[in-house]
Image (cartoon, helix red, strand yellow):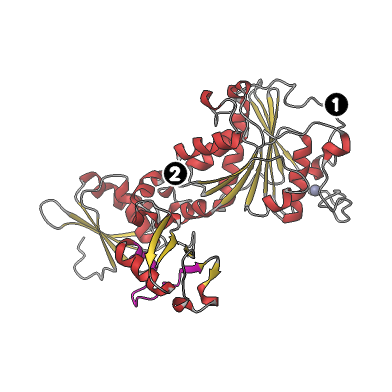
């Protein structure tokens, strides 16, 4: 009986890049042996020297671990799917020749090496917005081999975006930004899995989306989303790499769980109308390139655990005077969300609260 | 320097490979080894015969020997000292 077998990314070198192949047999053991016979590369990857499934590989059938069923003796029938799931970023999976060449300048760095590169490949980063800030961040994180990039953006590409949003190109005008982003990223590095979230972030969906990632990078252009993402990261203990731009100036900071948040700095958003949204304001096109790249560097430092994160500090960048300044930040014990007696204990949708328009991008 | 009495734990044949991949592959191999183990890399790219020992020393490893083993090939022997 032919059973579908899912092959994980790191093993596809042995299957001509196929993610689904077929194996024949009446139980899981027979199917795996058959796959090993027809793809000798797979055999070497999933079986140990005794011919047993190696300890660093799990086998699932229809989403259930075979260890909780009858192991290799688990019967299979038409329509079942067997999935091979290796331990990731544990160093068990060797780099492909292409990866060795692609990441060679990282591997050479004493602070990165093969171990660091595996951390990057195993990391899951969520980008809020595929606009001016999200573009350079996404491209550099993808080029660096950050293995999973989630991208939240409900918007479509407008020709006025192309002045700064370098993820998108002329032929993308009118298309969903997440779709355009996914294609640009695939052109840069096929190792990266992009998870598109073509939706507006709200109090309803923010926690379930952010929960799936290790680090959140905020590249949104409005206060409602900035506060929503900040609060969600506090509730979920996720590091937040924040960035914002306005006219010729930019800000960036890293908020580590338990060490302060955006509300420690600015407890509440300004009233609607007082500050123009990005749609009404001008912005120097290169500016988000600088701030987005700062965010990309901070994200990579967090993944690798190297250097000093931009935590407890606010970086201010003024393009006109070409001035970088660093302000000290501290955790505010009276912060409404991360302080000692928080008054905000659930997510707030500021657009309902104050009537300001909410868009991401 | 001679390597006659050194026990080699892993030999890596990098003939045909050029810089910087000679070092990149040597580094990846030594990362997976234990401290105190010895890696021997076989090279036929002259530039790498200079560069691999230098880079390994920079990374804190100890180069035990750089020996020509035949007309075209060299063996670089490295003791892993640092993770
Ligand atoms: Zn706070």
User: In which chain is the residue bearing label 1?
Assistant: A
Q: Nearer the viewer, mark 1 or mark 2?
A: 2
**Residue displayed at 55% across by 76% down:** A68
Of residues A329 and A280, the one nearer the viewer is A280
Q: Is residue A51 visible?
A: yes
Q: Residue furthest left?
A: B71
Q: What range is drawn magenta here?
A: A42-60
Which residue occupies 81% across, 26% down?
A: A275
Relative to B72, say whether A45 is above or below.
below
Q: Which residue is mark 2?
A: A190
Image side of residue B58 versus residue A351, left or right = left
- Percent coordinates x, y for residue B81 in the rendering: 39, 64
- What numbered label is drawn on residue A315? none
Q: Is residue A257 above or below residue A163?
A: below
Identify the residue position indicated by label 1 in the image. A274
Q: Residues within 10 Å of mark 2 (few under 14, many from 20)?
A: some
Indicate the chain on which mark 2 is placed. A
């Amino acid at each position: 009986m032919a059973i579908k077998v899912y092959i994980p990314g790191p093993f596809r070198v042995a299957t001509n890049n196929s993610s689904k192949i077929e194996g024949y047999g009446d139980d899981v053991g027979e199917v795996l042996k058959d796959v090993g016979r027809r793809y000798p590369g797979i055999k070497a990857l999933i079986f140990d020297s005794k011919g047993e499934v190696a300890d660093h590989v799990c086998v699932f059938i229809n989403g259930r671990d075979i260890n909780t069923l009858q192991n290799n003796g688990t019967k299979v029938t038409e329509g079942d799917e067997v999935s091979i799931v290796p331990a990731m970023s544990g160093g068990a999976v060797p780099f492909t020749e292409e990866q060795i060449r692609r990441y060679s300048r990282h591997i050479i760095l004493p602070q990165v090496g093969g171990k660091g590169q595996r951390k990057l490949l195993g990391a899951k980063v969520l980008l809020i917005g595929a606009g001016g800030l999200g573009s350079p961040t996404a491209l550099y994180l993808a080029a660096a081999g950050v293995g999973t990039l989630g991208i939240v953006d409900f918007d479509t590409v407008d020709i006025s975006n192309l002045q700064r949003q370098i993820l998108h190109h002329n032929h993308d005008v009118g298309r969903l930004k997440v779709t355009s982003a996914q294609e640009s990223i695939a052109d840069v590095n096929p190792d990266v899995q992009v998870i598109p979230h073509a939706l507006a972030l709200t109090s309803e969906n923010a926690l379930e989306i952010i929960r799936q990632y290790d680090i959140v990078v905020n590249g949104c252009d409005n206060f409602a989303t900035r506060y929503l993402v900040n609060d969600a990261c506090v509730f979920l203990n996720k590091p937040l790499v924040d960035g914002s731009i306005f006219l010729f100036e930019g800000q960036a900071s890293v908020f580590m769980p338990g060490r302060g948040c955006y509300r420690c700095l600015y407890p509440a958003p300004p009233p609607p109308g007082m500050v123009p949204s990005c749609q009404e304001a001008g912005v120097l096109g290169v500016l988000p390139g600088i701030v987005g790249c700062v965010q990309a560097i901070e994200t990579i430092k967090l993944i690798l655990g190297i250097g000093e994160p931009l935590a407890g500090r606010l970086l201010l960048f003024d393009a006109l005077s070409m001035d970088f300044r660093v302000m000290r930040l501290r955790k505010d014990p009276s912060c409404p969300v991360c302080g000692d007696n928080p008054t905000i204990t659930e997510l707030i949708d500021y657009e309902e609260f104050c009537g300001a328009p909410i868009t991401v991008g | 320097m001679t390597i006659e009495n050194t026990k080699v734990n892993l030999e890596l044949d990098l003939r045909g490979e050029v810089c910087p991949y000679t070092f990149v592959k040597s580094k990846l191999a030594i990362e997976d080894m234990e401290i105190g183990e010895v890696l021997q890399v076989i090279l036929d790219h002259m530039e790498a015969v200079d560069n691999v020992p230098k880079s390994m020393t920079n990374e804190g490893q100890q180069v035990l020997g750089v020996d020509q083993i035949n007309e075209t090939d060299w063996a670089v022997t490295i003791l892993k000292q640092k993770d």
